[in-house]
Amino acid sequence: MKYLKPWWSDGDSLLHLTILLSLAGLRLDLDLDLYLLLPPRTLLGDELLLPGGPTSPAYALSPFPASGGWGRAELLHPKGRERDPVAPPEGQLLREVRALGVPFIPCTRVDAWLVHSVASGDADGAHALLGAAAAAASSAGGVGAGVNGVSQAAPGSGGNPRAAPSSPLAAGEEEKAPAEPTAQVSDAGGHASEEKEVLGAVDHSSQHEENEQRASTQREKSLQQKNEDENKVADKPAWEAEKTTEPRNERHRNGTDTSFSLEDLFQLLSSQPENPLEGISLGDSPLPVSINDGVNSPTHYNVNFSQAISHDVNLHEAMLLCPDNTFRRDPVARTSQPQELFLQLNSLTNPEHTRSGTNLTGFLPFDNQMRNLTNQDLLYDLDINIFDEINLMSLATEGGFDPMEVSQLFEEPDSDSGLSLNSSHNSTSVTKSNSSHSECEGASRSSSDLGSLSHRDLEGAVGGCYPEPTKLCHMDHRSDSHFHEDLAFQPVLHNHTYHLKPSALESTYETFSWPGKSQKIRHGYLNDTDRNLSRDERHAKALHIPFSVDEIVHMPVDSFNSMLSRYYLTDFQVSLIRDIRRRGKNKVAAQNCRRRKLDVILNLEDDVCNLQAKKETLKRERSQCHKAINIMKQKLHDLYHDVFSRLRDDEGRPVNPNQYALQCSLDGSVLIVPKELVTPGQKKENQKGKRKSERRN
DNA sequence: ACGACATGTCATTCG
DNA sequence: TGCGAATGACATGTC
């Protein structure tokens, strides 16, 4: 446990709760479900306890921290509300919310949590959550000056909360004055020192025990101060603050107004459609809050929502896979989002009012609205895009895709359905997260279905979320509604895809055409991931073929045929799979063929070289042989003449070599034979040798 | 702009 | 007859 020492120590006003959320930390932990339970009448001087809080405040808000603590960020009530080191059941948490009458701040994904609550049957808890929201909305009077003041009070953020990590440090100078009873709005000057202190308290785990003791002591002190302030506030009705004509921000600045309605909060939220929290500067001073959730009696306390609320926590951004969602990116759309979000909230609480055009100020009491709600209403209205994605997924798995539909889908550049090639991947990740889903108490009655899927098989599949054959067959027999209900929990589960780059969904718009010679992929629409995929891989992905291309191509024919028979595949999918297999095999064959051809060419070239070398060698050998032969012949010729020069006839005269020849007999004897008697062959040889010797001479 | 080269694909043949 | 391998021919992308 870590105690965050408050940066106000005057203790004469209601507590200005500022939870310093590290923007960077939140960006890194966007899947954290953050709830801020802000106990009423928490006094200034109370210490902020972040159960299970590790080193980072943002991380400490995780509902499932590694330490096992219950990641609620709450103020320890001076009256001694004991922290609960053990994670309470979800329903208990919701009941606590309702019992306390405190608002929940829709940080990161509390709305997703709401879906989870509804889906898990905890309608009461969902109502409690919605109650606070609806109560705030019901009193909405438009975006007031206070809201604007808050929004304008974030010069350091530059309108981009992500770009202003230092904005919490840039809170107003006025807040440094301990005499200020309440924090001022619009002071973007800095809680620098305070935050440093807080962060320091968090980071130095070695001082943990010391901090805890100090916290305990200070809680006792603050308890007295809080009771005093509580009495002061109790004397001032909540509506009184509303009566004043003084601009809210001015009132805040002057410290004369210590109330801040949840309406203000939701006006802030609704004024920022893209990110309900975007316009709230971390440097904003605490806003006095007057809470009336429509269920419990009004309570008053001050919180610094500006710092308690995190950025980058819009449900659409956190849950859906639409990083390039025009809903968020389009500046024009942004301007229209406040009402849209508000209307969504309205429709959430009472769809009929929305349809009938009830304005924002015409809300029925929350309880009346909520009684008319069903879980399906809630699920439907929470985010229709989720079901768009689900429907398309089920279409792929159950009915297959019509080529024209697929083509139309992919060629629609303005499509904002969220269904994309990446979304299918996303579905995979969502499916994988069912394990964590099942960890949630009462999470889902169908989690076992999806949770039983083989991840190993899914990982290799091109199409993303596909079960094993037997599981798929089972799923096919389920009703659509059931299937959708299962998948409806996806947004509630941890979805880590919102860090995708805006280009991640560009592949959605890839031109899809059936394989053909004239086909040309418009790579401009492909993201880096899909650009690396082959055409067949993209097609298989688009048609949600539940096998990887490698499997399709390299699988033995028997396994391949049995696989096709085991899966419910459309003719279109089967045709594509067979084409993929054919093309894949032919591609390999072509590669092998070219490799062999190249090898043959190389071998032939080697043969040529070898033969040429051999030819040269033979030439040399032949030349050497000729030389040797000539030498021998010359020696024979010389010997011949030498022999004749020594020969004498019977009369002692030299023998004429032109008239006689030497002839070797078989027994080794040498005879002098007249040339007339020499055989023709011997004669020719003798003549040849004679001519050669003459030429040589 | 052009050619060389690599690669994928189709059509066809062959075993 | 079906299938896979092999291969020529063509198209396309890249350098």
Image (spheres, coloured by chain):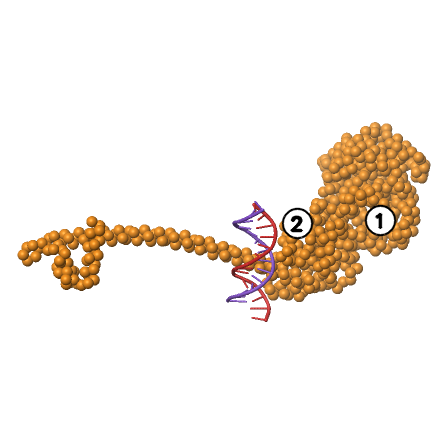
Chain colours: A orange, B purple, C red
Residue for point 14% across, 60% down: A675
Earlier-in-chain disc, 1 versus 2? 1
Specify whether disc 1 shares its chain with disc 2. yes
Residue for point 76% across, 46% down: A326
Identify the amino acid type marked 1: Gln
Q: Residue A179: in sight, yes or no?
A: yes
Quarter that holds the N terminus of chain A: top right
- Disc 1 is attached to a residue of which chain? A
Residue A330, above or below A43: below
Secondary structure beneath disc 2?
helix
Residue A597, above or below A204: below
Q: Residue A48: in sight, yes or no?
A: no
Give the residue at mark 2. A523
Kindly indicate the quadrant of the structure image that contains residue A390.
bottom right
Residue A257, above or below A690: above
Q: CA distance from mark 1 to mark 2?
A: 37 Å
Q: Could you tell me residue A525's position as x and y percent?
A: 68, 49
Give the residue at mark 1. A344
Identify the amino acid type marked 2: His
Query: Toward the viewer: A278 or A413?
Result: A413
Query: Toward the viewer: A466 or A421?
Result: A421
Sort mark 1 into few (<14), some (14-19) or many (20+) by Cα contacts within 10 Å.
some
